Image: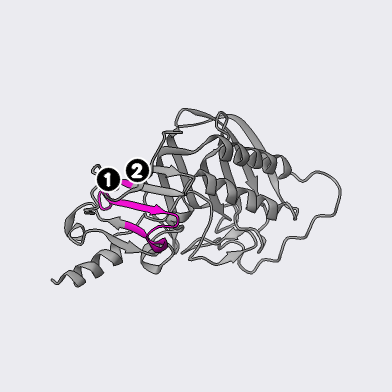
Amino acid sequence: MARSAWMGVFQAATVRGVAAILLATVATAQEVGTGLVPNGDVAKGNIGAADAQAVAGGGVHPLQPALELAQKGLSQLRTTIKDYSCTVVKRERIDGKLKDHEYLFAKVRHEPFSVYLYFLAPDDVKGQEVIWVEGQNDGNMLAHAGSGVRAMVGTVSLKPNGALAMQGNRYAVTEIGVENLAKRLVEVAEHDKQFGECEVNFFPNAKVNGRICTCVQVVHPVPRRNFRFHLARVFIDDEYLIPIRYEAYDWPQETGGQPVLMEEYTYMNVKINNGFTDADFDPKNAAYKFGAK
């Protein structure tokens, strides 16, 4: 098969999982009031529902303490965390089908925003690598497969929000990371606090992979067109004040049924301020396998 044909095989199938994690929310890139809409699937339980009514003035909205916590964490993150490494675990529902868990090792630097990903599992993506650096490579990401026929193609350059890169993913690589997750959480909270029908609970001393967290659970009990989820849980690391786990659920498909998982993202083994340099996000790095000369 000619190289161009192999390229087509690779581009159509290899970038599964390249999209970013973590949560909370961008689609092939159409902005709406609650942030960015995920690619492939949105809540179905509120289709045809009425809009939630705006709350009258006065009183403290149940979301206000959660919003203040998210804002405080975002501010602290921006002043104290320059970069971090972690293991990302994600699971997403695409076009009605809940996909298997995917595991990635990630390096993230905030200035300039830079991402390196190495896929750990499942086997069909193991060994795949991705690099994206803001302002470089004409805004494209670089990716290569880990093994098999697709690896023969070598490194390809893809638009992060393009159809090929987004295939089978809810979010683009440009949206990965705890800062983006924190920003999306703030956006959604600011939107939803305009309305009633919102229940918020705090659960201290929750644990995520051994880290002590505060779990914030938000429930919209009644399906409403202008809410993006029925139930969401955010786990805020008590030390770093960053979100390290996010879960979002659709309304149950039947009366008395269980909420339907739409997406979940976990950041494990977070190590901050590693002193990453340009070499950590360079395809020529000898530790990587992009094949750059």
Tell me where residue 286 appears, x and y as whole percent.
23, 43
Q: Is residue 258 visible?
A: no
Give the image location of residue 220, x and y in percent. 66, 52
The one nearer the camera, 15 or 158, is 158
Identify the disc placed on residue 285: 1
Mark 1 residue crowding within 10 angstroms, few (<14) / some (14–19) / many (20+): some
Estimate how packed mark 2 is, as few (under 14), some (14 to 19) or many (20 or more) residues with alpha carbons within 10 Å.
some
Whether residue 54 is in magenta: the answer is: no
Residue 260: percent from the left, percent from the top?
A: 52, 53
Residue in the picture at 42% in, 61% down: 139
Q: Secondary structure at mark 2?
A: helix
Residue at 85% across, 52% down? 57
Left or right of 292 in this view: 194: right
The quarter of the rendered structure image containing the C terminus is bottom left
In reply to whether residue 141 is colored magenta, the answer given is: yes
x, y percentage for residue 175?
Answer: 48, 54
Q: Are marks 2 and 1 in contact (CB under 8 Å)?
A: yes
What is the CA distance from the residue labelled 2 to the residue labelled 1? 7 Å
Query: Which residue in the rendered view is the most extreme toward the right?
Result: 58
**Residue 244, visible in the rendered structure:** yes
Q: Say what amino acid the circle numbered 1 marks.
A: Asn
Q: Quadrant of the N terminus?
A: bottom left
- Residue at image coords 64%, 69%: 48
**Magenta residues (range):** 118-142
Q: Quick one: label 2 or label 1, which is nearer the N terminus?
A: 2
Q: Is residue 285 above or below residue 260?
A: above
Viewer-proximal residue among 116 and 260: 116
Instruction: Provide the residue designation for mark 2.
Output: 280
